Amino acid sequence: MRLIFSVKLASIDADLTRNYTQMKEIIILASVAVSSIFILGYSIHMLIGGLVSETTEQWIIIGACLIGVAVLTFMGWDIVRRRRQR
């Protein structure tokens, strides 16, 4: 009886540790994604700011950020897919 209880506690502890690790990883990846999109938009602003009209600059930044979000979404989907295959 004591052995079964110990095994179940070890299993619960392993599940909690795995969930905590996954949650930390999700937070880190999300913060990296948000900062990457911000830096992408700002770098485009620094590159073409003043060379084109403000409206054109905003449309270019929006387009680049949408492409960046699509790329990051694909990368996130690929991470999830690879993790499920293990």
Image: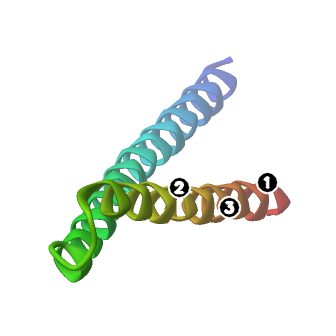
Residue at the spot x=34%, y=52% of the render? 34
Report the residue that reaches farthest toward the front: 53
Where is the C terminus found, in terms of image quarters?
bottom right
Of marks 1 and 3, the one in the foreground: 3
Give the amino acid type for the residue marked by disc 1 in the picture: Arg
Of marks 2 and 3, the one in the foreground: 2
Give the distance between the C-alpha atoms of the residues marked 2 and 3, in whole angstroms.
12 Å
Circle 2 sits in a helix, a strand or a loop, which is it? helix
Q: Position of residue 22 (x, y in %)?
A: 50, 46
What residue is shown with label 1? 84
Classify residue 6 as left or right of residue 39: right
Q: Position of residue 66 (x, y in %)?
A: 53, 55
What residue is shown with label 2? 66
Give the amino acid type for the residue marked by disc 3 in the picture: Phe
Give the distance between the C-alpha atoms of the residues marked 1 and 2, in whole angstroms.
27 Å
Among the two numbered marks 1 and 3 on one chain, the one whose residue lies closer to the N terminus = 3
Of marks 1 and 2, the one in the foreground: 2
Where is the N terminus found, in terms of image quarters?
top right
- Given residues 64 and 14, the one toward you in this image is 64
What residue is shown with label 3? 74
- Given residues 68 and 73, the one toward you in this image is 68
Among the two numbered marks 2 and 3 on one chain, the one whose residue lies closer to the N terminus = 2
Circle 3 sits in a helix, a strand or a loop, which is it? helix
